[in-house]
Amino acid sequence: MLGIVLAILKIILILIASVLGIVLFILAVLLFNFCRFEAIGNKCEKVTVKAEFKWLFGLIKGYYETDEEKTKYFFYVPFGICNIKYDSEGDNINIDLDEKNICNSGEIINKSIANIEKNSKIYNIVKKIKAFFTKIKNFITYIIEKIKFIQNFNDKYCINSLISATWKFLIRLIKNLGFKKLELNGIIGFDNPADTGNALGAISVVKTFLPLNVNIDGNFENKELTGNFNIKGRTNLWLILFPIARYVFTKPVWPVVKDYWKGEFNG
C-alpha cells in the first residue's frame, strides 16, 4: 500500500515539475528571445518611412510603410490571436450623397432667419468680450492651481530627485534598446545664410548629447531640407522590463507610483 502511495506521489511530483519546467521555459523564451527591428526614412521631394520588426523567431512580426500618398501596415500574431492588415490604396470609402437640397426646408429657413436677427453686431461684440475675459479668468485660475500643485508635489516628492532618477532611467533604457545602427544624415539650408550657420552650430552642440551618428551639411545658397535616417538593432523584454521595474521601485519614484495607484492624484 505504501509503495502505491509513493508511486502516486512520484507521478504527481513529476507532473508538477514538468509543468513548472514548461512554464519557466516559456518565460525564458519570452524574456530573453531577441526582437530585431529596423527603420529607414528619406526626405527629398516627399517623406518615405519603412519600419519592421520580428520577435519570437519571426512568429510575431509587424511592418509599416508610408510615402505621404499611401500607407500600409500589418501586425501578425500566430494561432489566430491577431492579424491586422491595412492598405490605404485598397480601402476606399464610398459615400452616397442625398440629392435632396436641404436648403429648401422651410423649417431650416425659419431657424436661419431667427439666428440672423439674434446675432446682431452689438450682441456679437458683447458676447466676444465676455468670452475673452472669461477665458483670461479661467487661464489665470488654471495657472494658479498648477503652481500650487507643483509646490505641494515638490514638498512631498522632491522634483529634482525625480528628474535625476528619470534621466538615469532613460539613459539605461536607450542603451538596452540595443541599437546597432543609428544614423541621421541631411542637408539644411535657409533663405538667409546666417540662419543656416546658426542652425548648424546648434546641431553640432546638441548632437554630442544624442546617442546617434548625426551628419548634417549646410546649403548656404538655396533653401533645402533633405535627409535620411537608418535605425537598426535588437533587444528583448528582459532588457526593457528590468530597467522599468528598477526605476519604479527606486526611492524617489515609488512613493509617486503608490499614491497615484491609490488615486490621490485624481482631479
Image (cartoon, grey):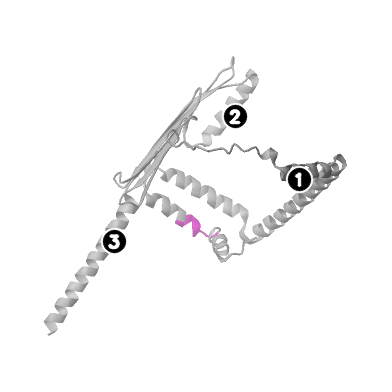
> In the shown orientation, is residue 93 left or right of residue 124?
left
Residue at x 60%, y 26% (from the top left corner): 199
> In the shown orientation, is residue 101 left or right of residue 188?
right
| Mark with earlier residue (3, 2) | 3
Q: Residue furthest bottom?
A: 1
| Mark with earlier residue (1, 2) | 1
Disc on res. 23: 3
Q: Residue furthest top?
A: 221
The answer for how far apart the CA atoms under marks 1 and 3 are is 69 Å
- Which kind of residue does numbered mark 1 sit on? Lys
Query: Mark 1, mark 3: which one is toward the viewer?
Result: 1
The answer for how far apart the CA atoms under marks 1 and 2 are is 58 Å
Name the one closer to the observer, 75 or 56: 75
Which segment did they paint magenta? 245-251
The quarter holding residue 84 reads top left
Disc on res. 202: 2
For residue 233, above or below residue 41: below
Q: Which residue is mark 1?
A: 111
Query: Mark 1, mark 2: which one is toward the viewer?
Result: 1
Residue at x 56%, y 37% (from the top left corner): 97
Answer few, some or many: residues within 10 Å of disc 2's Cα (few below 14, many 20 plus, some between 14 and 19). Answer: few
For residue 80, above or below residue 265: above
